[in-house]
Amino acid sequence: MGECHETNSTVAAESTGGVHRLVAIVGPPNSGKSTLFNRLTGLRQKVANFPGVTVEHRVGRAHLHGHHDVDLVDLPGIYSMRPRSEDERVTHDVLHGTMPGLRRPDAVMLVLDSTNLGRHLTLAAPILSLGLPTLVLLNMADDLAQRGGEVDAEKLAIQLGTPVALISAAKGEGLGAVTRFLGGGIAVPRPVELPVLQDVPQCRQWARQVSTGAGYQTPSPSAWTRRLDGLFLHPLWGPVVFLLVVGAVFQSIFNWARPIMEAIEELVAWSGGWLTTQLPDTLWRSLLVEGVWSGVGAVVVFLPQILLLFLFIVILEDSGYLARAALIADRTMARVGLQGKSFIPLLSAYACAVPAIMATRTIESKRDRIATILIAPFMTCSARLPVYTLIIAAFIPERPLLGGLFGTRAASMLGLYVLGFVAAVTTARLLKSSILKSERTPFVLEMPPYRRPNLRSVGLRLWERALAFLQRAGTVILAVTVVLWCLASVPFVDGQPPPIEQSLAGTLGRAIEPLIEPLGFNWKIGIGLITSLAAREVIVGTLGTIYGMEAEGDSRGLQAALQQDLSFAGAVALLIFFAFAMQCMSTLAVVRRETGGWKWPAVQFVFMSGLAYVCALITYQALS
Amino acid sequence: MQVSFKNGSSGAPRRTLADLAENHEALVERLELPEDLAGRLMELGFVPGQPVVAARSAPGGDPRVFRVDGAEVALRRETARHIFLQPDPVH
């Protein structure tokens, strides 16, 4: 099929300079594509977005011994080449070379689950018909052998007219064939007789014939998956286990991360003090130490906690448990007018609303998708964690609950998470019974077998998250901190920066004070509320800067300083405010891109912030 | 394709996937669902003649997981009700 070459040569030249071969990794969901991709690219990968659509894809570079480097693109999982959701469309468009911003791949690696070959081979028909050089990889070969299955890769290769290799991406076995394919002579598949692609039963029959011809022996079913489902989907124990897991996550976020956080805190304070002694007493020193150091440092402290939370979410996702959680949640979600699939983005919104909103692409119904996007920011994202931790640690005394199993602080934190969830679900109900009313959409979800999470993949995702967090601390938070420092240093009085109260920042805070006074907040918290419109955790940095500039040698911590400024009622009101308010530019930007306009982000911002104000007001007035 | 949207001429109540008891097996006869959904289900294995086993369900009995062609797929009762089974049970 030579007609594809001339249409794409121009794109190829501009995207990579035509130096490296571009190879796409394709396969059904849960076949281990990403594990292979991670194995081949390691840290030489990045998440990218196609222009116009929000579907993420990963591109990376593989170094091959004795060969040229190869660029790899990891595409969303597909069952067929007839796309039904936005992410499937991306795979379709990339393989046909119609995706703007990416040239057509030079070759394809089709990753299939060898333990489920009879079914997965169905996808080989449409992929082979593309006419691109193709390597078929039968992944999880170790699992296949262990469970008593077998297949003759050579016989399969003859029938498919293209090379076939048995591999284990998780263990790194059999990758020699991959290296040879990527680096060496790749050829267009020898034409073989393929079924009519539109006829699903015929395609399946073809796949069955081919696999039988290759001596495929279906392995015995995974005993582990049955056993674990017996527990996780048990009518009584299932929900109990779910609650225990969630409880353990919160308890550990509070207790395990603490020593590391305290160590970082001390390091920031110590290095700030050291810098003060090393630098001459100028305005620059003030900017560096009181502005940047205490501002950015106050936020960086929370990195261990955020990574711990991500670790739990990644493990739940990679082990296959998340699909079961979606199954259990479907009934509840149906009651508020959504379906189980909406639960997965909502759960990942506990980490961050931005990827969660992107994950809504798997929801086929447009109205369900918008409803999910609108409620996702109510879920307690990791950016709220620093704010919650700071306020809870400063205002809630630690006491054992349930016979020491649980502390009051972890319980308060859990309560805030529940509050966010309730707000999300109630809003969904409201939306789905009014402006986003629609017929019930079907719930069809494949349950992946349980797998042990791959250490390498988990490590890579955490590394990526840590970088993203530090990058934010180094850009958005740094910028806001510097601007804030400047605003807090002018206008000069007698050639000196003014007391912070009389500075421009102080004036701004005082200007909104009448508005927030009924909520129990003073002008310093007011400045924090303004800056946290950029991102929630910025308030911690802001308070760090304000108190850093105010303290003048007085080294009381952020917590102690806050206790001077907030009453208990005000602290609870502030927690409630942060639970509901829409304070995240990145989320609003993603929602705008995702929904194609300013309408939905505007609705979201007004609704969430209004709700936050009213609820904080009621809380403060009731408690004080 | 064995996809029909409506079949009004049914006399006796026919068995559907929703009637299949846990751990029981039956063969799929046809799908009476919108084409898009039917296509997706067929890709997942719900094709005529295919044996399906009812497996565990979410607490409350809905949705239920069905074992079909080496995969486990969760469906709501309201969808399973439109997947008709061949009259003679295998087991």
Image (cartoon, rainbow, N blue to C red):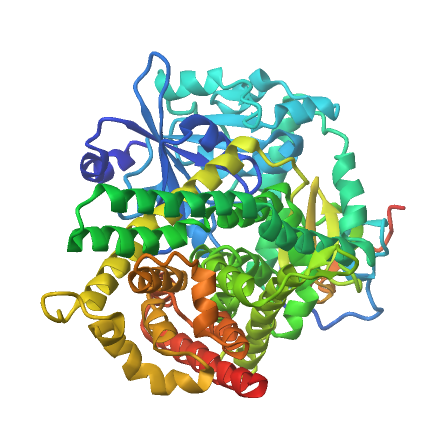
Considering only vertical position in the picture, is A564 above or below A19? below
Q: Is residue A257 left or right of residue A476?
A: right
Single out the residue that lies furthest toward the left: A495
User: Is residue A118 in view from this perspective?
Assistant: yes
Considering only vertical position in the picture, is A267 above or below A138? below
Position of residue A422 measured from the top left corner of the image (x, y, whole percent): 60, 73
Q: Is residue B52 left or right of residue A297?
A: right
Q: Is residue A369 left or right of residue A270?
A: right
Q: Nearer the viewer, residue A152 or A357?
A: A357
Q: Quadrant of residue B21?
A: bottom right
Q: Quadrant of the N terminus of chain A?
A: top left
How many numbered markers are drawn?
0
Single out the residue that lies furthest toward the right: B91
Position of residue A6 measured from the top left corner of the image (x, y, whole percent): 21, 36
Position of residue A206 measured from the top left corner of the image (x, y, whole percent): 60, 35
Q: Is residue A94 left or right of residue A379?
A: left
Single out the residue that lies furthest toward the top: A66
Q: Nearer the viewer, residue A359 or A375?
A: A375
Q: Nearer the viewer, residue A540 or A133?
A: A540
Q: Residue at x 53, y 88 (%)?
A: A621
Single out the residue that lies furthest toward the front: A553
Q: Residue at x 15, y 52 (%)?
A: A282
Q: Quadrant of residue A480?
A: bottom left
User: Is residue A194 in view from this perspective?
Assistant: no
Position of residue A501 measured from the top left corner of the image (x, y, whole percent): 27, 75
Q: Quadrant of the C terminus of chain A?
A: bottom right
